Image (cartoon, rainbow, N blue to C red):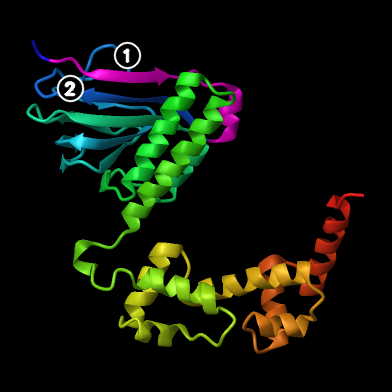
Amino acid sequence: MKPAPSSFYRYFPISGRDKKWGLYATTAGETRVAPQAVYPPVGHPKGYAFDWQHGRVFEEFALVYISSGRGKFESKPNFSAAIEPGHAFILFPGVWHRYAPDINTGWHEHWIGFDGEFARRWLQRGFFSAKNPVLKMNAEDTILATFSRVMQAIRTNRPALQQILAGATASLLGLLYSAQQAQPVTETVNSNAIELAITRMENDFARNLDVKSLAQELNVSYSWFRSMFAVHTGLSPHQYLLELRIVRARNLLAETAFSIKEIATQTGFEDEHYFSRLFRQKLNLTPSEWRRRSQRHARRTSGP
């Protein structure tokens, strides 16, 4: 007799509050599929059940993570991939797909279905694409811990369960996007240069730090450094350094009595006037206005 899959899953009703939240879960669960077992297991509602021959089309999203075992994934128009432990794939609304474990290995799958205006916006703005639905994930411990918290929240029926699941979904998608932004294997030389550069900037932002010289110190070309830094952070190295300095300046304005000129110097700006112009450009307030507003807020929130 073939061993049956071991599953735990739920499908969720969606309230108006959940839709207003902007991201909500439609289903979540996990299944251990033993070798030689029939797949997919029976019991899923109409619209979620499928078979390999016919595949399936969702009206929502789902993220599926495979923690052990092997299998295959296909989606239209012409995507196919072998699935290994540590792979995740996204199912996209309106896109035909099918997937199954290898009959000789089975697999352990974890999933969360989701939808909402945030998910649709991320798709529309190109953060995720049906052309690239399968990715090798990093941080396996974090991913499994997140799915474990999801299962625990569902089993205990936590208050505001949908909002908890939305947070977990966003966390998983953030990890997926990080994996998507990772360098190809052909660019693994000096792959820790960006991490080292960020650490250096955070420690030495107040000094006269030149980003081109920093790339040279890290033994990478500046064009590669600038391009990969933007992939990792969404900012150029120069803009990232400026943001660090502005954040520190905001804190000094709120918490100290240093003059504007002293704060400019302490945060790496040689020109007080340039600092003030940049500060206003980014926050729509001058440094003095920011300080006054911060002090008023501190007085209102301080105790008697």
What is the magenta range?
3-22
Reply yes or no: does residue 21 show up in magenta: yes
Pick whichever, 104 or 126, lies toward us. Answer: 104
Identity of the residue drawn at 28% across and 73% down: 190
Identity of the residue drawn at 26% across and 47% down: 135
Pick whichever, 152 or 53, lies toward us. Answer: 152
The answer to whether marks 1 and 2 mark residues whose Cβ atoms lie closer than 8 Å is: no
First of labels 1, 2 by sequence position: 1
In percent of width and height, residue 289 lies at 82, 69
What SS does tag 1 mark? loop
On residue 54, which mark appears?
A: 2
Task: Tell me: residue 36, above or below residue 181.
Answer: above
- Going by the image, does 8 lie left or right of 263? left
Q: Rounded to the nearest whole Å, what is the CA distance between mark 1 and mark 2?
A: 14 Å
Residue type at tag 1 = Lys
Task: Tell me: residue 200, above or below residue 121.
Answer: below
Task: Tell me: residue 164, above or below residue 182.
Answer: above
Q: Is residue 236 among the parts visible in the rendering?
A: no
Identity of the residue drawn at 48% across and 26% down: 153
- Going by the image, does 198 lie left or right of 163? left
What SS does tag 2 mark? loop
